[in-house]
Image (cartoon, rainbow, N blue to C red):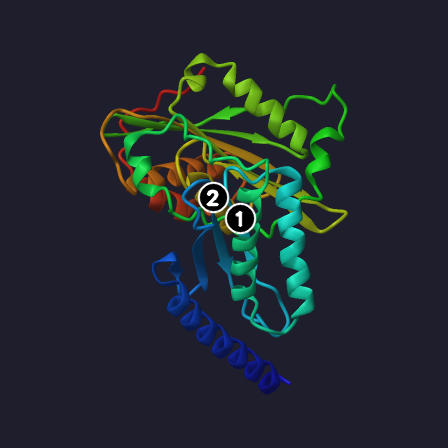
Amino acid sequence: MADVILSGNEGDLQAQIEEVEALSSIYGDEWCVIDEASRIFCIKISNALDETKLTACLQIILPADYPSAAPPIYQINAAWLRGPERTELANSLEDLYVEHAGESILYLWVERIREFLVEKSQSSEAVSEPEKVNMTAEEDDDEDVPDFRMLKLNTENAHLFMQHADDEELPPIKHGNTITDRRSTFQPHLAPVVTPRQVKMVLEKLHENKKIASATHNIHAYRIYCEDKNSFLQDCEDDGETAAGGRLLHLLQILDVRNVLVVVSRWYGGILLGPDRFKHINNCARNILVEEGFTACTDEANKSGAKSKKTKSKKTK
């Protein structure tokens, strides 16, 4: 049996290699390898129309048993894609997978998304992508950086935000120590949450604090374990710090934490930090998760945290 499984995995890996090579040849610079060892890729898709140009970024993770037994894990990033339209596109991709189960599907997915962009731009409701707000200069350079949000698109849980009573209690909010580097300051905030409504309540409460509300970015991510479905409800927000929300959520997934919301505030100091800003965001989050007992990875957190320059330890009151 082990030999059969191994053979199957080898067959899937070979099929993935051939598919990736073909996509790279077809799409050129639009195709991007994020982490070949982890089988993470992305492609920027556009409708190629100058008048009403729309773009979307398709991020993909290829499981070990794709294409023989499992679909790709994917996320579509497009600021203009919302509500029913996002659901419609997701359903069309899932229908394609069902129709071609066991086959390589990525090319069909990319071209379906491109068709959707063309249809959208040609409709009377075509809209241009909204302008980015609250962005520091260095974020402009990261417009196409994937956010590593390893989520299979799932819209069925949206109703949970409206499902709970208005008298639900506000969870306790903890504020962590700051990290300051080249005049930029980062501070984490954490709250235990078990419903999406609590996530909303905590975010609203944090924004009542004038200092937090004045932050250049308030990045957040959360994971809620749904026992009845044996699955996670999870989401994240960049708040203008491109790709930061997805990276933060990825950290929560790696640490396998549950029923928690983490927010990291950043006050931009006028000096570009480049990739270091992501390190500080994740170190802030990891440290407060360890401090509040959400993960046992204390040693790992201390090693990572020791690399950060902590020049302030003042907590938000």
Q: Look at the image and tell me whether residue 23 can be seen.
A: yes
Residue at image x 60%, y 73%?
103
Where residue 40 sits: x, y (%)? Answer: 45, 60
Tell me which amino acid carries mark 1: Leu
Q: Which residue occupies the foreground of this view, 7 or 297?
A: 7
Asked where in the image residue 139 lies, by quadrant, the reply is top left
- Residue 112 sits in which quadrant? bottom right
> Which residue shows up at 47% across the image and 43% down it?
54
Amino acid at the residue labelled 2: Leu
Q: With respect to residue 226, does 220 lie above or below?
A: above
The residue sitting at 49% across, 53% down in the picture is: 58
Spot occupied by residue 123 in the image (x, y as percentages of width and height): 59, 41
Please tell me whether residue 17 is drawn above or below residue 258 in the rendered image. Answer: below
How crowded pointer 2 is (Cα within 10 Å; few <14, some 14-19, many 20+) is rated as many
Q: Position of residue 308 (x, y in %)?
A: 29, 38
Helix, strand or loop at label 1? It is: helix
| Quarter placement of the C terminus | top left
Residue 213 point in image, percent of width and height: 45, 18
Viewed as shown, does residue 256 lie left or right of 48?
right
For disc 2, the marked residue is: 54
Depth check, front residue: 108 or 61: 108
Give the alpha-carbon distance from disc 1 to disc 2, as whole Å: 6 Å
The quadrant in which the N terminus is found is: bottom right
Mark number displayed over residue 117: 1
Q: Nearer the viewer, residue 83 or 48?
A: 48
Q: Is residue 172 visible?
A: no
- In front: 246, or 80? 80
Q: Are marks 1 and 2 in contact (CB under 8 Å)?
A: yes
